[in-house]
């Protein structure tokens, strides 16, 4: 399966995947990696998180975990249709579940939802995005808010790209930040731009004892067109500054 996701080295245009074998392999990769799914119900703006817990090609069935926040379970049980977005190592995947297709089941003694495997899946390779370093003295904050916790974690950017960033926070915060978790709404404060509201997914977390800080790999989850433009502009600005400093160092 890793071959399917590593053949393309750079950004590619979106494509529709219709091969049942390839779709099954992609979904199994999302399941094995515990990559979070972002679920958006038709005609609703709120986003929900879930995970794939089983892929059964013989039964033509995809099993999804309960949703976070729990309000999503009510919409699903009412038969509302929804679209699903997922990311894996710079690859964006999207598919839909039509109204009435998700049924409540029990899987491994826990509540879950069963849907049919998608007949087509949008696949967009975004890997290769330029990642720009952010000076520590710049102190660009990203405030993380969990949908079910009453605590804001204020982190600071170490680097940023069009699709995500690396951030730091003082002390050992590994117990508060689990890979695969979705944080929303989060607030990114870019210089000269102001506050951008985002949903983000935690990719990896590590505590650096020598620096007494936790470093976090973060993926931006479907930023609005306006937020994406502001992020792109900031990344381009950092890229220009890096090139300018590099040129000055040559003389």
Image (tube, rainbow, N blue to C red):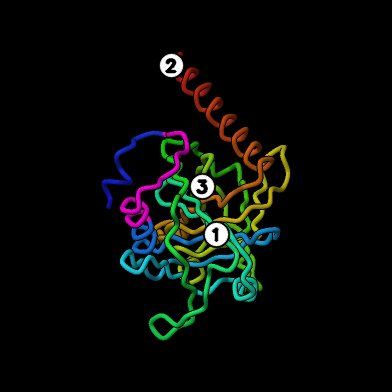
| Residue behind mark 2 | 250
The residue most toward the bottom is 109
Q: Nearer the viewer, residue 42 or 164?
A: 42
User: Label for residue 38?
Assistant: 1
**Crowdedness of circle 1 by 10 Å Cα count: few (<14), some, many (20+)?**
many
Which mark is nearer the camera, 2 or 3?
A: 3
Magenta stretch in the rendered image: 11-26
Disc 1/disc 3 C-alpha distance (Å): 18 Å
Q: Residue 165 carries which label?
A: 3
> Residue 178 versus residue 121: which sits nearer the camera?
121
Mark 2 or 3 closer to N-term? 3
Q: Which residue is drawn at 53% across and 21% down?
A: 244
Q: Is residue 89 above or below residue 150?
A: above
Residue 136 included in the magenta stretch of the image = no
* Cα gap from disc 1 to disc 2, whole angstroms: 46 Å
Neighbor class of circle 3 (other Cα within 10 Å; few <14, some 14-19, many 20+) is many
Residue plotted at (45% across, 39% down):
15
Residue 108's x, y, as percent? Answer: 38, 82
Foreground disc of the pair 1, 3? 1
């Amino acid at each position: 399966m890793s071959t399917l996701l590593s053949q393309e080295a750079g950004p590619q245009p979106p494509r529709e995947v219709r091969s049942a074998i390839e779709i099954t392999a992609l979904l199994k990769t999302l399941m094995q990696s515990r990559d979070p799914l972002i679920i958006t119900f038709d005609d609703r703006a709120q986003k929900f998180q879930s995970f794939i817990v089983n892929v059964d090609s013989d039964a033509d069935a995809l099993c999804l975990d309960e949703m976070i926040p729990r309000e999503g379970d009510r919409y699903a049980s009412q038969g509302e249709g929804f679209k699903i977005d997922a990311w894996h190592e710079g690859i964006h995947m999207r598919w839909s579940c039509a109204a009435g297709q998700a049924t409540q089941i029990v899987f491994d003694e826990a509540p879950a939802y069963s849907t049919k495997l998608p007949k087509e899946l949008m696949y967009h390779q975004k890997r290769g995005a330029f990642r720009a370093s952010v000076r520590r003295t710049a102190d660009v904050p990203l405030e993380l808010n969990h949908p079910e916790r009453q605590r804001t974690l204020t982190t600071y950017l170490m680097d940023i790209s069009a699709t995500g960033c690396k951030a730091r926070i003082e002390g050992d915060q590994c117990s508060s930040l689990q890979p695969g978790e979705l944080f929303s709404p989060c607030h990114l404060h870019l210089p000269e731009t102001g506050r951008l509201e985002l949903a983000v997914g935690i990719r990896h977390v590590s505590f650096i004892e020598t620096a007494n800080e936790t470093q976090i790999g973060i993926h931006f989850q479907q930023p609005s067109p306006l937020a994406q433009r502001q992020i792109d502009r900031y990344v381009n600005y950092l890229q220009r500054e890096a090139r300018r400093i590099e040129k000055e160092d040559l003389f």
